[in-house]
Amino acid sequence: MRLLDRYLIGQILWFTLLVTAALVTLAALFSFIEQQSDVGVGSFGMLDAFFVTLLRVPKQTFQLLPIAALIGALLGLGNLARGSELIIIRAAGVSVARVALAAAMAGVALVVVGGTLGEALAPPLEAYARQMQTLGKYANMNYAGHAGIWLKDGARIVSIEQQSADNLYGGIFVYQLQAGADGRQHLAAVVHADSAAIVRGKTWRLNNYAASLLGTERVTTQRAATTLVDSDVSSELLAAAVVDPGSLPLRGLWRYVSHLRANGLESRSWEIALWSRVARSLSTILLCMLAVPFVFGPLRSSGAGSRTVIGIVIGVVYFLINRTLENSGDVYGLNPLLVAWGPAVALAAVTTIAIARVR
């Protein structure tokens, strides 16, 4: 049985690899074409666009892997069905559940590969691609964006106008809050610094420091060339605040969600991104298993083209449902766990029923 499992898993993984290569090539081509509007802006050239496209390949692979897994499983198992190999396997006493288990093991292998790409390679490469594109297009770089960054750090509200390096920031305002006798938060101090840098851990060095302390009767000021301030706001949290949730690794998403919760801030959109990432990764296993009832049932004698079309339709519909729920969940205030896991639970139910009905 181990030999049979390896044979079935090998077929699924091989065809998934071919499908993934085809889908990623198309996605990279569209990405390269999309960047043509930026070619010639600043120093951003055709070669830069090519490198940016290559740097985004791991992220595209991670995003397309569930659909590729379904199509690959349909093609791999369908190829065995057309050669009557699945009939021989069934005649030897192997159950449909056993074949589905082999497909699930192939899905687990794909989840491991996808997790490596999506969590270890894609985030830093995507960040470097974004930085390369920004540096090429704009000579005076404001990498954090012209809108600035706003973060809450306990009783402090931090505003950062621009980021010019990984740990160098400019235009810092810190608004210190303090609970009053009425139980409400009141503004106690306003701090400004021309620039700031994270010198070690979570210690900030503020340059050209100026503070206005708001007392009950008067305002006092303090000034210093440099001063050190301890804060829970780290460079990772600042990076999380200015990038799309889909560009962060799970660890970064989890830390940022924890930070938002700890400070009583709205975290629904980030929680949806976090749990949807986990649910989509695990759904790769279910999509591999979903191919089993098709190849034993209506698509057993169909050609590869029919299976590919069916796989694309199912994959696209599942993707659209996921995206629709993610967007509407944030708009209508739905529970993040329901939004993220709802489609995966429905897919698991459909897959289980479909496999159980195969004779």
Image: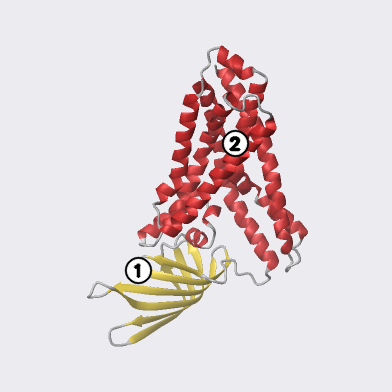
- Earlier sequence position, callout 2 versus callout 1: 2
Does residue 343 appear left or right of residue 265 in this picture? Answer: right
The image shows residue 264 at horizontal and vertical percentages of 35, 62
The image shows residue 346 at horizontal and vertical percentages of 45, 39
Q: Are marks 2 and 1 in contact (CB under 8 Å)?
A: no
* Scheme of image coloration: secondary structure
Residue behind mark 1: 155
The image shows residue 356 at horizontal and vertical percentages of 47, 25
Q: Residue at x 48, y 25 (%)?
A: 357
Looking at the image, is 99 positioned above or below residue 37?
above
Q: Secondary structure at mark 1?
A: loop
Which is more foreground, mark 2 or mark 1? 2
Give the residue type that dot 2 points to. Ala
- Asked if residue 176 can be seen in this view, the reply is yes
Q: Residue at x 45, y 47 (%)?
A: 340
Residue behind mark 2: 69
Q: Secondary structure at mark 2?
A: helix
Task: Give me the C-alpha separation between circle 2 and circle 1.
Answer: 48 Å
